Amino acid sequence: MKIKYFISLAFLLFVTLHTYADDGQSLETNVSVALGINTLEFRNKIPGGFKQVLETRYTSLNLGLSTAYDRFYVALNSQLSASANADFEQFSGGVSTSATRFVMNRDESSITLGGQLVDAVTLYVGYTVGTNSGGTQHEDKGNFYGIDYKLPIKSDQSLRLHVAFADLEGSPINSCNYTGDTTGYSYGVTWSVPTKNDRLFFVKFAMKSYEFTGASSLGGACAATMMIDQDYVSTTIGTVF
């Protein structure tokens, strides 16, 4: 599904929710602001024993806007990262051949549509775009599908578990023009508690693992196939108001 169709669907749902709200129904709109601490390990594997490994730790500003009516919601989220140093090392036959350090960024944005199946279970579907820029450039974009489960806690606190699966298009940005599919999954847990002034404080821990398999038809110095593993770990602390 292309991003323009998802934006159109999200806009249509947003207008529909506001239409019902005009008829006296309850509509809730929230804004979230959070600080994220993230790690990324990026492993580029090419047949013949050649491998590139990138590791970095970076901070991010995570912004969100959501509107909900009854059991349904639409949400827009964006992650903007600060520039960070990345360690980059190349291997051939299992032996390190070079190592360097450069500055990179990681930015993500997504649109999510969801609905509460039962009181504790929410299903959702979305479209995401994630881009690594710097010495190693890569972009993944496409659909994800997930489920969220609210654990029963006898207090005003909330503890939610979430799992999602991604089916994306991947494209390393280099002269070989590799294109292919990126698949993977993510899981995490979010704890939240109400604070004063009708705000919500939350802490979220999440892990994400993607695998890209692509091909290039250019030949020459470009290998016919390439595989890239991406592992992300993030801890996010923020507020909803």
Image: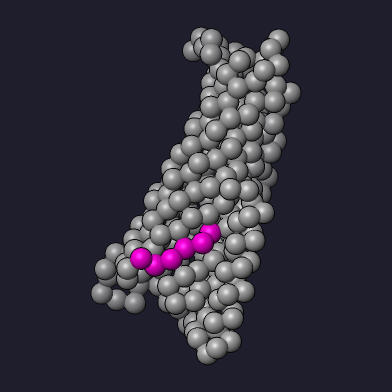
Q: Nearer the viewer, residue 66 or 90?
A: 66
In magenta stretch: residue 114? yes
In magenta stretch: residue 212? no
Q: How many numbered circles does the render carry?
A: 0
Residue 33: % across, % down: 58, 66
| 9 vs 26: above or below | above
Residue 44 visible, this orientation: no
Q: Residue at x 60, y 56 (%)?
A: 6
Residue 214: % across, % down: 58, 25
Q: Residue at x 47, y 74 (%)?
A: 200
Quadrant housing residue 154: bottom left
The quarter of the rendered structure image containing the C terminus is bottom right
| 121 vs 229: above or below | below
Residue 227: % across, % down: 53, 24
Q: Residue at x 63, y 55 (%)?
A: 5
Q: Which residues are magenta?
A: 112-117
Quadrant housing residue 101: top right
Residue 165 visible, this orientation: yes
Q: Nearer the viewer, residue 37 or 25?
A: 25
Q: Is residue 138 left or right of residue 41?
A: right
Magenta segment, prevailing SS (helix, strand or loop):
strand
Residue 179: % across, % down: 63, 29
